Amino acid sequence: MIVGFTGTQHGLTSAQGLALTGLLEELAELHQRGLQLHHGSCIGADASAAIIADAIGYEVHAWP
């Protein structure tokens, strides 16, 4: 499963970080293999999403 993400350069709020973590964890439970997060390689929210996804076990790809 491939998840695409893009966000603001100002980063994630605490609530957004928790919501994103919950969503990525839920998707990981449904699709236990082949998990990928693709993002735009920007500072802020993209970087945070990459860190969260990596911690959950996603293969992370950046597209500058």
Image: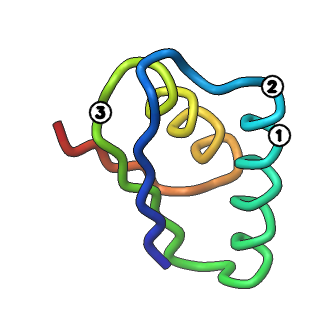
Residue positioned 56% across, 38% down in the render: 49
Residue at the extreme left: 64
Residue positioned 58% across, 43% down in the render: 54
Q: Residues within 10 Å of mark 1 (few under 14, many from 20)?
A: few
Residue positioned 59% across, 79% down in the render: 33
Helix or strand or loop: what does disc 2 sit on? helix
Q: Which residue does the numbered mark 3 point to in the structure image? A: 41
Total numbered labels = 3
Q: State whether residue 10 is above or below residue 46.
A: above
The front one of 16 and 58 is 16
Q: Which of disc 2 and disc 3 is earlier in sequence?
A: 2
Helix or strand or loop: what does disc 1 sit on? helix
Pointer 2 with pointer 1, Cβ within 8 A: yes
Residue 40 as seen in the image, left or right of residue 28? left
Residue 31 as seen in the image, left or right of residue 3? right
Q: State whether residue 14 is above or below residue 34.
A: above
Residue at the extreme bottom: 30
Residue positioned 63% across, 54% down in the render: 57
Inspect the image, locate mark 1, and give the three-letter code of the amino acid beneath it: Leu
Pointer 3 with pointer 1, Cβ within 8 A: no
Inspect the image, locate mark 2, and give the three-letter code of the amino acid beneath it: Ser
Q: Which residue does the numbered mark 1 point to in the structure image? A: 18
Q: Residues within 10 Å of mark 2 (few under 14, many from 20)?
A: few
Pointer 3 with pointer 2, Cβ within 8 A: no
Camera-nearest label, 3 or 2: 2
Q: Which residue does the numbered mark 2 point to in the structure image? A: 14
The front one of 55 and 37 is 37
Query: Which quarter shows the C terminus?
Result: top left
Distance Cα–Cα, label 3 vs label 1? 21 Å
